[in-house]
Image (spheres, rainbow, N blue to C red):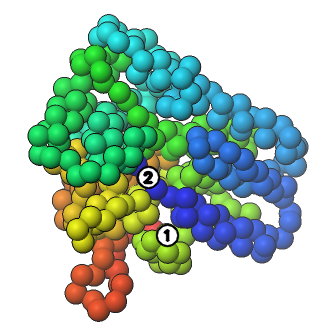
Amino acid sequence: MTNLTSLSRRTFILMSLALAACKGRDNVLKLNGSTMGTTYNVIAVDHSGSVNTVDAQKKIDSALALVNQQMSNWDSNSEISRFNAQKGTESFSVSSDLANVMQSAESVHLASEGRFDTTMGPLIELWGFGANGQTTMPTDAQIAAAQAQSGHAQTLRVGASSLQKIQADTQVYLSAIGKGFGADQVGNALKSLGINDYMVEIGGDLYASGKNPDGQAWQIGIEKPTALSGGVLDVVGISNLGLASSGDYRNYFEKDGQRFSHIIDPVTGRPITHTTASATVLAESSMLADAWATAMLILGREKGLEIAEKHDLAVLFIDRDTKASQIEFETTASSRFSALTA
């Protein structure tokens, strides 16, 4: 799951600073609110001067309300919650939007060799990062049992307009792809108003379209992956791209001197142990950036870079330098990431 509250705030500060230099030729809309258990921020450049803040806010909130009705795991009446509550294994009809998200999730699942997985709730609960908050260390047998209840291939069938459980107790969680999809949908709402230059950010997942108020690419900050506020490690300029980061440094526990991150590898059933602290992904949509950021962090730099080059993915890995006497980081970019941010 992406864990980007601090990144989202820091990113938005950078963008707000860019606004200060705007010469005021265009109508710049700044909107924000709450959704999906987090916050959203929007900057939109209305060149026509015909869009007012109230109309834009209504469009945005309407788009986000629909996403929540489809994909919120916290709303018992949402599509995905009703699917999760279904006890049998009969086919369950879903909206085209939810089908699109689930097909994308399955595609990333396969391309990432199983690292992105929307069905790994049993493993998350087992390690104490779910609603139950278990604090005892799981046994090998418990991990194996949780793995048997997880995995797209063995628990779920994704159709063009339906979902079907292979195992009756399968549960789908969309926190690692839903915010990105929400950002894309807000962008579509802005385009329906004739706005093509905008930045939408939801909980750290964002989509930047066109140019910022200064006529430049949107400037996005990438945070240093430290538990305390570590400042900005790098700034990238992007246009017509989604961006998401995933980090292992906010949510974890320690036991017997060992650190256990909330980022769990569904293939091993255990928290990741490699030195990659965060992964940032640029993609054609915020939805795909969201999903791939999670997958790439789980994979880690070595295997992740191999898959990124194979699929022409834009990824920046930030690793802890374990040889340094103090906290230091090393960055590694895929070829596509370097090309897009040159």
Whether 232 is drawn above or below 136: the answer is below
Name which of mark 1 and mark 2 comes first in the sequence: 2
Q: In the image, residue 249 lies at what x, y percent?
A: 39, 66
What crowding class fits label 2: few (fewer than 14 Cα within 10 Å), some (14-19), or many (20 or more)?
many
Image quadrant in which the C terminus is located: bottom left
Q: Nearer the viewer, residue 118 or 219?
A: 118
Give me the residue at 43% from left, 28% from top.
100
User: Disc 1 on helix, strand or loop?
Assistant: strand
Q: In the image, residue 175 lies at what x, y percent?
A: 45, 41
Quarter of the rendering containing residue 10: bottom right
- Count all numbered tags in the image, as a single digit: 2
Give me the residue at 65% from left, 49% from top.
40
Question: Which tag is nearer the camera, tag 1 or tag 2?
Answer: 2
Q: Nearer the viewer, residue 124 or 10?
A: 124
Amino acid type, residue under disc 1 in the picture? Ile
Give me the residue at 86% from left, 63% from top.
25
Whether 214 is drawn above or below 325: the answer is above
Asked whether the viewer can see residue 1, the reply is yes
Give the label on residue 222, or none: 1
Asked whether the viewer can see residue 217, the reply is no
**Residue tagged by mark 2?**
2
Give me the residue at 74% from left, 63% from top.
213
The residues tagged by marks 1 and 2 sit, at their Cα atoms, a distance apart of: 14 Å
Q: Nearer the viewer, residue 325 or 279?
A: 325
User: Disc 2 on helix, strand or loop?
Assistant: loop
What crowding class fits label 1: few (fewer than 14 Cα within 10 Å), some (14-19), or many (20 or more)?
many
Q: In the image, residue 136 lies at what x, y percent?
A: 26, 51
